[in-house]
Image: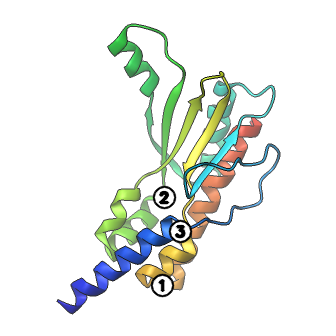
Amino acid sequence: MKLQLNQLAAACVLSIALLSPAVHAASTVPAASVSTMPNVYRIPLAKGVSMDDAVESMKLRANELNLKLVAELPLSKQVEAMVGGTQRRMEIYQFCDALTAKDLVDMNVDFAIYLPCRIALIEDNTGKAWLVMMDMDVPAWSKASHMSPELTAKIMKVRNGLIEIVNAGANGDL
């Protein structure tokens, strides 16, 4: 019972932590935009960078960082098939460090809801392309769940790698 209460308390603290602003890794131009949603890292594609170049750049950077692309979800294609008309581009790319994911889930199965890490390529109403992801507040997660320093470091490495992937995509760093 006491263990369950401790886990519940940790989950509550984690939930509150996810609503607090996170500090972003240094990024190159263009700068990340402020989102209306908490813990969101959102960045527009730089002028002259096509959405296809952004995707290719993200895949290349993920490969360099040893973050595996585990899924691509072309949601706009699904919507097109359902409504019979062209849609703005909306795709989800899922990346994962399988060993870190295993360590997280071994510590607390509830962390599975964050797996794998997702980056969305979204074309807004004006035709502008954005890369959007959840920005993990690793220090808050670590504190709330009593993570070991080693696991905290692994998760921070994944989080910083995701920021690097998004920035590479936004800048078309092939």
Reading the image, the residue beneath label 3 is 155
Residue at the outermost bottom position: 2
Place residue 48 in its image quadrant.
Answer: top right
Q: Which of 159/99 is in front? A: 159
State the separation of the CA atoms marked 1 and 3: 11 Å
Quadrant for the N terminus in the image? bottom left
Residue placed under numbered mark 1 in the picture: 148
* Amino acid tagged 1: Ser
Marks 2 and 1, the one that precedes in the sequence: 2
Where's the C terminus, which quadrant? top right
CA separation, marks 2 and 3? Answer: 9 Å
Q: Residue at x 22, y 92 (%)?
A: 2
Is 118 located above or below residue 171 in the figure?
below
Distance from Cα at disc 2 to Cα at disc 1? 18 Å
For mark 3, give the secondary structure.
Answer: helix
- Left or right: 83 in relation to 157: left
